[in-house]
Image (spheres, rainbow, N blue to C red):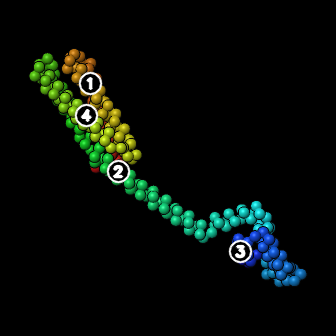
Amino acid sequence: MTGNHYQTLEIGANSTAEEIKQAYRRLAKRFHPDRQTDSASHERIVAINAAYEILGDPQRRQQYDEQLTAHSPATRQRRAAEAQKSYNRAREARQDDEILAEQWRDKTYSPIDRLIGQIIRPLNKQIDALSADPFDDELMGDFQRYLETCRQNLDRARTIFSARKNPSKMAGVAAALYYCLNHLGDGLDELETFTYNYDDRSLHTGKEMFRLANRLKTEAREMVGKSGGR
């Protein structure tokens, strides 16, 4: 038997309804049981009848044509090509994302991480020095100069942070840095307030803000490490 209903009726896929009917009549007559008695002819007439049942009905023919198209070698080849293109685009997108993430780590995260460290690390030493006599003008002047340097570093870090779009792969790191910088800003406000009112509550709150900022700094570094950063 032939491969599909069109081949069974010995017609092309673009045949009209009348051509299909004529082909069926011709083959049905040719392989009619009264004219052919061998088993091969019997199988052929069964196939011819089955083919005409499908192709002779416009709706069933349309469904059959759709199935043929879906399973044709050309369609499979086209789908395979589309799948390959989709895979290539996805791979290129991943490569682009990785390049953007690496650039962001180098140009945004790394300098901000260094600036945050320059703000946080000296705090305890500065407070210890000031605690000798908070009312000493020279000691307070040193502490204020430290806070001014911190403010400058914080402004630089915020400028760097806003200069480059955060890649999706670095979204968690960016969020940690964002809140870290906010905590540092709040902490500096409290520490500066302490230099005017000598209220230990401002000093305590400032230290707590720096502690929270340091925790976020650590979280950001751990996420960078998991993402493959240095």
Horizontal relation, residue 91 to residue 15: left or right: left
User: Between disc 2 and disc 1, whose residue precedes?
Assistant: 2
Residue marked by disc 4: 155
Q: Position of residue 24 (x, y in %)?
A: 81, 74
Q: Which residue is at a point 14% across and 22% down the rendered structure image?
A: 140
Camera-side mark, 1 or 3: 3
- Callout 4: few (<14), some (14-19), or many (20+) C-alpha neighbours within 10 Å? some
Q: Earlier in the sequence, mark 2 or mark 4?
A: 2
Name the amino acid type tagged 4.
Answer: Asp
Q: Which residue is mark 1?
A: 189
Taking the spot 32% from the left edge, 31% from the top edge, the residue there is 182
Circle 2/circle 1 CB separation < 8 Å = no
The residue under label 3 is which amino acid type? Gly
Judge depth for marks 4 and 1 and give the one in front: 4
Name the residue carrying label 2.
100
Return the residue nearer the eye: 81 or 34.
81
Q: Is residue 221 left or right of residue 69?
A: left
Mark 2: secondary structure: helix
Q: Position of residue 20 (x, y in %)?
A: 78, 72
Q: Earlier in the sequence, mark 4 or mark 3?
A: 3
127 vs 79: above or below: above
Q: CA distance from mark 2 to mark 1?
A: 34 Å
The residue furthest right is 34
Q: Earlier in the sequence, mark 2 or mark 3?
A: 3
Residue drawn at 38 percent across, 42 percent down: 171
Spatial distance from mark 1 to mark 3, Cα to Cα?
84 Å
Q: Say if residue 222 shows up in the picture.
A: no
- CA separation in Å, label 2 and label 4: 24 Å
Residue 226 got which mark?
none
Name the amino acid, label 1: Asp
Residue denoted by label 3:
12
